[in-house]
Image (cartoon, grey):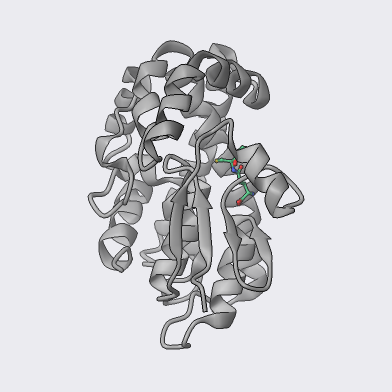
Amino acid sequence: MPLPKLYIFPISHYCEKARWALDYLQVDYELHAVAPGMHADLTARLGAAGTSLPVLVTDESVIQGSHEIIEWAEGVSSGERTLQPADLSAAVEMESRLNEVLGVHVRRMYYSEALVDRPETVLPIFADGLPAEEAQFVRDAWEIIVGAMVEKMDLGPEQGQESRHIVLEHLDWLDTLLSDGRHYLVGDAFSRVDLGAAALLAPLAMAPEHPTYGGLQLPPKLAQDIDDWQKRPVTRYVAEMYRLHRTV
Ligand SMILES: N[C@@H](CCC(=O)N[C@@H](CS)C(=O)NCC(=O)O)C(=O)O
């Protein structure tokens, strides 16, 4: 039986979330990096409802979205490990805040500086892992790709400040939750809530276990913020989740 194919953007924290879950649950798959700009054709060809990645293609279905991929992986994994949270209703509420709000604003904060002021720092990770001709496509179409992303994600200095403010509110929220000494966000064991929070906040820790951030150069204002946030409980928590649980 052919392996499921996981389509990702190497830079994407949502893609990292799906990839980490498959690795953690020991579900085999083939990894495919996709060139931004080529992804809409790919998702249309696969019959996915939207254009976003991650997408997992199995012998039976096309699964779009990090959460949906995690649920699928949980269903097919051998059962030796699970990412199921102890308290489902607490988990669902937290996950929706992490996925729908925090993840979006971490991305907008980063790109509002990186793509607007320092697009040359983003190009290498966008071309990472691509076949040579697709990497060349990304280089040739770089200005168009940047323009499309600025428009689609509504990027700019004010937007970056707005997203930074929302990110800070969420860091405070997570610091408060962690202040009772808990090791995991829900219950006593690592769950998909922790995996999601750590993947979406991975730039805070730039953990050596992260599969694609090794060569990522953060733009200066964000790098300064992250430096200032190193002593936060949430930063230590993200680093710890990677250290303890991001092994294949
Ligand atoms: N809620 C989705 C979000 C995925 C998402 O926003 N992916 C972005 C990359 S970070 C994407 O593919 N953007 C391109 C597009 O939507 O066309 C998930 O959890 O998978």
- In this rendering, position of residue 167 left or right of residue 97: left
Q: Determine the residue located farthest toward the left in the rendered image.
A: 208
Residue 184 occupies which quadrant of the picture?
bottom left
- Indicate the position of residue 85 as horizontal and vertical percent values: 54, 75
Task: Name above or below for residue 151 compared with residue 93.
Answer: above
Closest to the observer, 88 or 17: 17
- Indicate the position of residue 215 as horizontal and vertical percent values: 26, 35
Quadrant that contains the C terminus: bottom left
Residue at x 56% of width, y 42% of height: 102
Residue 246 occupies which quadrant of the picture?
bottom left
Closest to the observer, 172 or 101: 101
Task: Name above or below for residue 155 compared with residue 216.
Answer: above
Q: In which quarter of the image is ligand 1?
A: top right
Residue at x 51% of width, y 58% of height: 6
Task: Name above or below for residue 25 compared with residue 196.
Answer: below
Tell me if I can see residue 177 in this picture. Answer: no
Residue at x 42% of width, y 54% of height: 198
Residue at x 56% of width, y 34% of height: 105
